[in-house]
Structure formats: structure tokens, C-alpha cells
Image (tube, grey):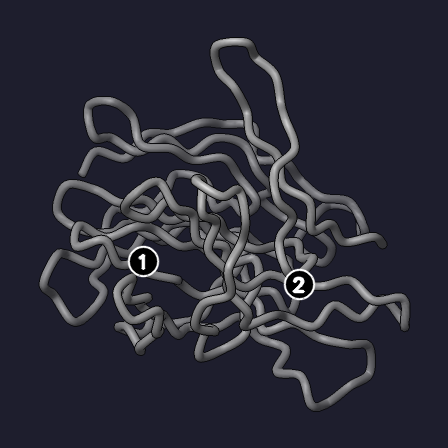
Amino acid sequence: MVTLATAEIFDPVHETWTPTGAMTMARWGHVAVPLPGGRVLSAGGMVGTARYGASPSLGLCEVYEPGSGTWQPTGSLRAARALHTAVPLPDGSVLAVGGDPGRASDDARFHPYSLASTEIYDVTTGVWRPGPPLPWGRSYHRAAATEDGVLVFGGTESACLHTGFASTLRLRDGAGHWEAAGPQLTGRWSFGATVLGDGRVLAVGGVSRMDAAAPRTGEGVPARSAEVFAP
């Protein structure tokens, strides 16, 4: 597998893509989050290697400077992670949530389970600090910034990838812990999600079950539905 470091910019007026400066590290399964001043934070991810399909997760982060079209290294995550989520907070900082610590085949040094930890990036210092931990780990989930905090929903356990989570968690502004919110009607992971203009959150598609939880081993059961969360 070839992992890319290239980056492109989309022009919505002309509907065209143009190349811009490449990242300093090739990666996939990472997040890209807007920062104040038009900058963009790229955090974590994986780098594919040829040896036995190993995909170790990254802690490396970098910031895109739109004025120069270049990427500059910034503080690394406290825990390397991929297939996680990240959302901007009202004060300009960034919250990274959960994800996969990465693994290599038959290598017991790699923790096989999804991360429950979260981290907060300080845009002034470029340093990550611990955030409120999740009740349990999850990967392939989605997160959305709402009017009163952050919503985390869906996902699965990366060690098995059998069943999509229906649970929803909410971190209210100023709170130091996560609380349960209304669950999804269908557990799902690797799905699309966005915040609608009225503040509601849309979840659509994804995978519901796979392998041991599916009717046939090796086949996934898609989540064909869409649902809306009203904060």
C-alpha cells in the first residue's frame, strides 16, 4: 500500500483541484481540523509499510500555513492514534478523541484495543494535554461540535470490527466528564456525519456488522439508514 503525503486545494467557484505543499509525513487514517487564521491541523494517522501489512499509528502532527502553502511540524500527540476524530473547540483548541493505536502482525507490543483517551491541542503553545477519557475506547466513530459541547457517536472496537456502536456521548462545555446521550437507532462505523444548519447532527450510511456478527463470515452488513440527532 502506498501512503500519500500530497495535498490539494478545492476551488468551489471553478470546481477544480490544485496541488499545494506536501505534508512532511505521508499518512492515512488521520484528521484535518481548521484552526484560527485559516490554518489546518493534521494529526495522527497511519503509515503503511510493506512488511506483513503493518500499519503503525503516528503521533506526529503538522500545521498547514495557507499563506505559504507549506506544512510545519507542531507538537506530537501524547498517544499515537489513527482512525480517530478531532473537533475544534470554541477557544480555538482542538479535541482529539479515541482511535486505533495501530498494530503489526503477530507483534505483542501493540495494544490491540481502541483508545479511550482524549487530548486537547493548545494552538498557542502547540502542545497536547490530556482530556476527559471516554468510558470505553472506540475507533471509526464520528464527533461533532454542537452549541453546548461535543458529541461523539457510533464507531466500533478496532480489535474485532464486529458490531457498530449505537451509543452516543456528550461532553458539555466546561464539564470534565462525558455523559450518555440518546443512542442511534442503528449501530454503525465508518459512516458520514455532519452538523446541519439548525444545529442537528446527521449520521448516514456506514457498516453495521461484520465477520462473526454478520450472516456470512467475511461479509459486512451496511447501515443503509440515515438518522438525525437533535441536541
The three-letter code of the residue at mark 1 reads Val
Q: Residue furthest front?
A: 68
Q: Where does the N terminus fall, quadrant-wise?
A: bottom right
Cα distance in 3D space between marks 1 and 2: 20 Å
Drawn side of residue 82 relative to residue 54, left or right: left
For disc 1, the neighbor class at 10 Å (few under 14, some 14 to 19, many from 20) is many
- Whether tag 1 and tag 2 are in contact, CB under 8 A, the answer is no
Drawn side of residue 196 relative to residue 73, left or right: left
The residue located at (28%, 49%) in the rendering is 151
Residue where numbered disc 1 is placed: 94
The three-letter code of the residue at mark 2 reads Met
The residue located at (77%, 76%) in the rendering is 104
Drawn side of residue 182 relative to residue 140, left or right: left
Residue where numbered disc 2 is placed: 46
Q: Residue furthest top?
A: 14
Relative to 97, say whether 35 is above or below: above
Q: Picture coordinates of residue 214 (x, y %)?
A: 69, 48
Q: Picture coordinates of residue 89 (x, y %)?
A: 23, 53
